[in-house]
Amino acid sequence: MNRSIISKNAYTSLLTAIVAFLIFSTTAMAQVEQHSQISIQGTALVTKDTNSGPLSQHTTKSGGFLVGYAYQFNRWAAVEGNYGYTQNTAYTVGSIGQSSIRSDFHEITGAFVAHIPVNFHGLRPYALGGAGALVFNPTNDAKRINPGIDRQTKAAFVYGGGVNFDVTRLIGVRAEYRGFVYKAPDFTLNTLNLDKVTHLAQPSVGMYFRF
């Protein structure tokens, strides 16, 4: 008899937990009127100087753009995919002299976005973390000056955060910071290989559109 009572209590508790979870999930989803969001941002890119033995690498600061699509599951959880572009020059100095490689820089990332469930005068803060690929594609002029270099892709970890400001129910302004951690590029040339991890800071500001 005791086992029967305990079993019934266990099933009742489990059923209650499942129902509560479903109600919470449905309520959270209902609080998000527009699940999709497109963002367009202007960016600044600042890469940390990298040193390894006789080699050192300095990358010029540059400006670019970042476009993204996000899908929000509930008030606090979303996923986001982004593509960014700029063009900059990497200077590598060593015993062989100095190389100057100008390249098209592409970033392709995916991230989990955690929205802090507060809304202070239309301001909605968030944090993000994810991974992606950074593509360094030397220009034709750079290839002529530096024989042997080629396009190179580096895996990257991305983290950051920002704040959304709702101008209307569907349109708003976004200010954001992203940090990238990845191995310094050598453009497939062993003489330029630093074998060191570097960091890229990317502050940005732009608009978003919800639908």
Image: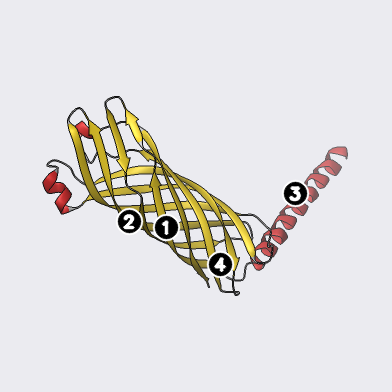
Secondary element at image label 1: strand
40 relative to 55, above or below: below
Dot 4 or dot 3, earlier in sequence: 3
The amino acid at mark 1 is: Thr
Q: Name the residue under label 3.
A: 14
33 relative to 8, above or below: below
Number of the front mark, 2 or 3: 2
The amino acid at mark 4 is: His
Dot 1 or dot 3, earlier in sequence: 3
Q: Mark 4 points at which residue?
A: 35
Q: Residue at x 67, y 57 (%)?
A: 117
On screen, residue 39 versus residue 25, left or right, reads: left
Q: Mark 1 points at which residue?
A: 43
Q: Residue at x 55, y 69 (%)?
A: 172
Residue 97 is situated, as x and y percent measured from the top left of the image, at 18, 32
Please tell me in which quadrant of the rendered image residue 121 appears: bottom right
Q: Residue at x 25, y 37 (%)?
A: 92
The amino acid at mark 2 is: Thr
Q: Are marks 1 and 2 in contact (CB under 8 Å)?
A: yes
Secondary element at image label 3: helix
Q: Mark 2 points at which residue?
A: 86
Question: In this view, which residue lies farthest toward the top?
Answer: 53
The quadrant of the picture occupied by the N terminus is: top right
The amino acid at mark 3 is: Leu
Measure the C-alpha gap from mark 2 to mark 3. Answer: 53 Å
Dot 2 or dot 3, earlier in sequence: 3
Number of the front mark, 4 or 1: 1
Q: How crowded is mark 1: few (under 14 residues within 10 Å), some or many (20 or more)?
A: many
Dot 1 or dot 2, earlier in sequence: 1
Residue 133 is situated, as x and y percent measured from the top left of the image, at 36, 48
